[in-house]
């Protein structure tokens, strides 16, 4: 497994270079005038343009610009926004809350999703099964902003149970409702995936063997059925962590959370090119690492998957 | 134990099982009856879908229900009625008194746990052993079924075993709690011929040593010829013939049994069969279990069928010794003309020739 991990880590290098280069070219190379509208109604002054050209190496060929940017990036320098703020400061401000929110969302979707899936998968047809199937279908069908706005309105405004807008440095408790909203879609998928997987495994030959061995029912279910059924669920959750770490523009917007999603969104809107490139580069790395983690986890869960 | 002394080890009587409901109900078992005594091997022979495995699952109490439904009959283990018995009582019988091995050991073993873990489970949860002691016992079991380097192999996963080794591990698992009855559901079907012989030898040896009853479910005549004391032939959820192996091969009383024998290739030249002789497969297909033909269920495929066959279901009845050479033995067949077929004998080689090849 060690060699496999190393090989996979090395594979990340070209992927990282490729994606960041594409992003860099797309934002810098394709905009005719990066400074359009940057100085209000007026044209930007020549000194300002010269300063910016200097700061972002805009006189160099695109590839050289990219390499210089990459070099800085590798030393931890994410560059500066047009207004001169360090991008790394922006990230440091916004990322913790995004990570917290993502973890809260994953925990909620894992707990509720798996519990609902196990409940229906074991019980079979009946009221609970129908309830879960219908409610998950509703969650899948509803766009996240609807779920978010409804919950904010009902719980935050009408009932006053939560603050409709999450404060700057939120506690875990204040992130539960936004986390639920963020995780609701995946939670529905997790519930259904768990249910299907359990139903499939309930008829598996090895479960029959376990029964034929005269093992107690809870042992058959808890050890022989669940472990096998949860393999696809765990991998799904792993990928979801990677995706959620990329920020949640809608959920952050609804609950006024100043996370990484909103930061990228504003960066794109305001054409703050340096912010976009910096954050996207970081998110690429996070996503790649999450994927690697899932692949390694898969091998741990299922011994048939062998990487060496 | 509520065992009745003098009772048979296992007795199945008029067992009836249906699958599904409504007009599409499949009548999978239509009055199956057989028995096994200690130290004895009963072979259950028949095509796919004849109900061999469902009978075994019903005996073990591992029938998928629903869709399966037991509609009648009885299964008695040492005189104790099992159908309708307390589920916990039945669970305790599994593994301890009766165990089962399955056809495809790769899918029958849990892929995510080591072979040792799966054998040790029984020692841990049925014998209350510690994890460590149970693993030691598991290694001993692997050693018993002659898996080389057992100490090492207990820690391996099923996919790291070869096909024959996996089946050996299955057998080790089934024998772990020293059952009195072992049901082997097509234990050699998924294996190649040389390995088949080894597995059969192992099963036979363990049966002899432990004095346990063995039900050997198979569709392979060659496999049963060597080891079976008695053979029950199943067709469409019924026993159509039941006798000892010698009689069955020499004097098959049911045209279906004869058809089975004629559809097996021969490599040697015996009294009746010639190597390279054309095979005579049984024409047609087994009937749909949702629409079993009236009368004898085999009549649409039977070359000798006459009017009475389409009208009356032939009961399984004693037909007696067919010839003087035959030792006095029970021989039952479910055919209106069983005596005639039995007297004709097989135009195929006798058991001895099959056995000695």
Image (tube, rainbow, N blue to C red):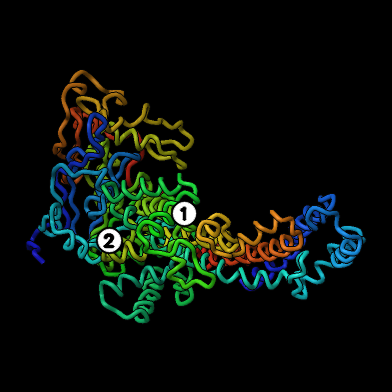
Quadrant assignment for the C terminus of chain A: bottom right
Which residue is disc 1 drawn over?
A148
Q: Residue B24 at x, y = what percent?
A: 26, 31
The residue lying toward the viewer, choosing from B185 and B37, is B185
In the picture, residue A289 is in which quadrant? bottom right
Which residue is disc 2 drawn over?
B99
The answer, for residue B111, to whether it is visible in the render is no
Q: Residue A275 at x, y = what percent?
A: 72, 63
Circle 2 — which element?
strand
Q: Residue B355 at x, y = what percent?
A: 36, 49
> Furthest residue to the front?
A41
The chain to which mark 1 is attached is A
Circle 1 — which element?
helix
The chain to which mark 2 is attached is B
Q: Residue A150 at x, y = what percent?
A: 42, 51
The residue lying toward the viewer, choosing from A233 and A272, is A272
């Amino acid at each position: 497994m060690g060699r496999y991990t190393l090989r996979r880590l090395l594979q990340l290098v070209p992927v990282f270079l490729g994606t960041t280069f594409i992003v860099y070219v797309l934002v810098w190379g394709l905009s005719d005038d990066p400074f359009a509208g940057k100085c209000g109604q007026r044209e930007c002054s020549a000194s300002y343009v010269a300063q910016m050209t200097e700061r972002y190496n805009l006189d160099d060929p695109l590839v050289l610009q990219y390499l210089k940017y990459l070099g800085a990036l590798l030393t931890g320098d994410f560059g500066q926004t047009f207004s001169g703020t360090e991008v790394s400061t922006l990230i440091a401000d916004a990322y913790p809350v995004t990570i917290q929110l993502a973890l809260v969302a994953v925990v909620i979707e894992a707990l509720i999703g798996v519990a609902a899936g196990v409940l229906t998968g074991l019980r079979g047809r009946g009221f609970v099964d129908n309830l879960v199937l219908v409610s998950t279908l509703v969650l899948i069908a509803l766009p996240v902003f609807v779920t978010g706005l409804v919950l904010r309105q009902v719980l935050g405004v009408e009932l006053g149970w939560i603050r409709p807008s999450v404060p700057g440095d939120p506690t875990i408790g204040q992130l539960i409702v936004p986390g639920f909203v963020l995780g609701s879609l995946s939670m529905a998928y997790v519930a259904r995936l768990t249910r299907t997987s359990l139903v499939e495994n309930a008829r598996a030959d090895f479960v029959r063997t376990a029964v034929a061995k005269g093992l107690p029912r809870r042992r058959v279910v808890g050890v022989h059925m669940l472990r096998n059924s949860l393999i696809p669920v765990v991998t799904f959750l792993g990928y979801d962590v990677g995706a959620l770490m990329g920020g949640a523009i809608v959920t952050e917007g609804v609950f006024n959370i100043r996370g990484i999603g909103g930061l990228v969104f504003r960066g794109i809107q305001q054409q703050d090119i340096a912010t976009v490139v910096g954050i996207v580069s970081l998110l690429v790395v996070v996503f790649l690492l999450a994927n690697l983690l899932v692949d390694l986890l898969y091998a741990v869960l299922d011994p048939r998957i062998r990487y060496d | 134990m509520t065992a009745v002394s003098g009772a048979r080890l296992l007795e199945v009587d008029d067992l009836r099982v249906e699958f599904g409901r409504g007009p599409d109900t499949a009548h999978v078992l239509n009055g199956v009856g057989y028995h096994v005594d200690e130290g004895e091997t009963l072979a259950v022979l028949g095509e796919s879908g004849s109900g061999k495995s469902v009978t075994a699952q019903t005996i073990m109490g591992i029938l998928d229900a629903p869709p399966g439904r037991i509609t009648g009959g009885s299964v008695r283990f040492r005189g104790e009625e099992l159908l309708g018995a307390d589920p916990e009582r039945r669970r305790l019988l599994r593994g301890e008194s009766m165990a089962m091995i399955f056809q495809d050991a790769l899918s029958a073993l849990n892929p995510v746990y080591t072979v040792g873990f799966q054998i040790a489970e029984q020692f841990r949860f049925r014998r209350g052993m510690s994890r460590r002691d149970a693993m030691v016992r598991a290694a001993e079991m692997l050693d018993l079924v002659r898996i080389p380097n057992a100490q090492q192999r207990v820690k391996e996963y099923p996919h790291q075993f070869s096909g024959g080794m996996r089946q050996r591990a299955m057998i080790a698992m089934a024998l772990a709690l020293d059952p009195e009855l072992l049901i082997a559901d097509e234990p050699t079907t998924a294996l190649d011929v040389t390995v088949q012989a080894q597995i059969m030898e192992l099963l036979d040896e363990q049966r002899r040593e432990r004095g346990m009853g063995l039900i050997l479910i198979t569709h392979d005549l060659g496999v049963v010829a060597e080891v079976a004391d008695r053979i029950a032939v199943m067709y469409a959820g019924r026993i159509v013939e039941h006798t000892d192996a010698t009689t069955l091969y020499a004097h098959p009383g049911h045209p279906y049994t004869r058809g089975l024998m004629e559809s097996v290739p021969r490599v040697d030249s015996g009294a009746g069969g010639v190597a390279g002789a054309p095979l005579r497969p049984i024409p047609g297909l087994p009937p749909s279990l949702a629409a079993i033909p009236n009368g004898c269920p085999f009549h649409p495929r039977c070359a000798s069928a006459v009017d009475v066959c389409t009208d009356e279901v032939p009961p399984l009845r004693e037909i007696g010794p067919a010839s003087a050479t035959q030792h006095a033995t029970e021989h039952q067949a479910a055919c209106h003309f069983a005596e005639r077929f039995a007297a004709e004998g097989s135009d195929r080689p006798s058991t001895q020739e099959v056995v000695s090849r």
